[in-house]
């Protein structure tokens, strides 16, 4: 069972790395778009899975493993601190509000979409 989480987390973190690299190539802004998109899509997918209530091993692989490896709370907070430390408080506040509120919204949307299936 633990190997399901490990394999899923490895795949999720590789996916996060690729998305981050590609996003930074196309969007060279002061705003951490890659982490924002990754975390919101992860929140949606986790809400969707939660709503489906899959069997335990399926959730361990997809939810805990892949989504857990894909999303990154630590990078979000490191980027927030970086924005505040480099005197970008408005950007930091907008990133914080959109990330936390957006995470709740996207999780809820994923959950309710799963109920339609």
Image (spheres, rainbow, N blue to C red):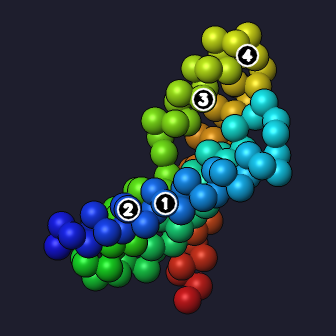
Label 3: element kind = helix
Q: Which residue is mark 2?
A: 10
Distance CA(mark 1)–CA(mark 2): 6 Å
Residue at 76% x, 34% y: name it: 31
Residue picked out by circle 3: 79
Kindly tell me whether residue 60 is visible in this rendering.
no
- Separation of residues labelled 4 and 1 (CA atoms): 31 Å
Alpha carbon distance from label 2 to label 3: 22 Å
Mark toward the viewer: 4 or 3: 3
Cβ atoms under marks 1 and 2 closer than 8 Å: yes
Mark pair 1, 3: CA separation: 20 Å
* Callout 4: SS: helix
CA distance for labels 2 and 4: 34 Å
In the picture, measured across the screen, residue 92 lies left or right of residue 108, that is right
Distance from disc 4 to disc 3, alpha carbons, whole Å, reads: 12 Å
Labels in figure, total: 4
Q: Residue furthest bottom?
A: 117
Horizontal arrangement in the rendering, residue 4 relative to residue 76 (left or right):
left
Circles 2 and 4 in contact, beta carbons < 8 Å = no
Q: Which residue is mark 1?
A: 14
Q: Earlier in the sequence, mark 1 or mark 3?
A: 1
Element under disc 2: helix
């Amino acid at each position: 069972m633990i190997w399901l989480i490990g394999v899923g987390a490895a795949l999720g973190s590789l996916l996060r790395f690729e998305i981050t690299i590609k996003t930074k190539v196309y969007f060279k802004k002061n705003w951490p778009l890659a982490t924002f998109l990754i975390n919101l899509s992860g929140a949606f997918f986790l809400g969707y899975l939660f709503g489906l209530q899959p069997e335990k091993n399926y959730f361990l692989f997809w939810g805990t493993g892949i989504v857990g490896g894909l999303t990154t709370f630590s990078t979000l907070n490191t980027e927030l601190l970086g924005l505040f430390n480099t005197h970008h408080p408005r950007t930091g506040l907008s990133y914080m509000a959109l990330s936390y509120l957006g995470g709740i919204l996207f999780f809820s949307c994923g959950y309710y979409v799963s109920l339609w299936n």
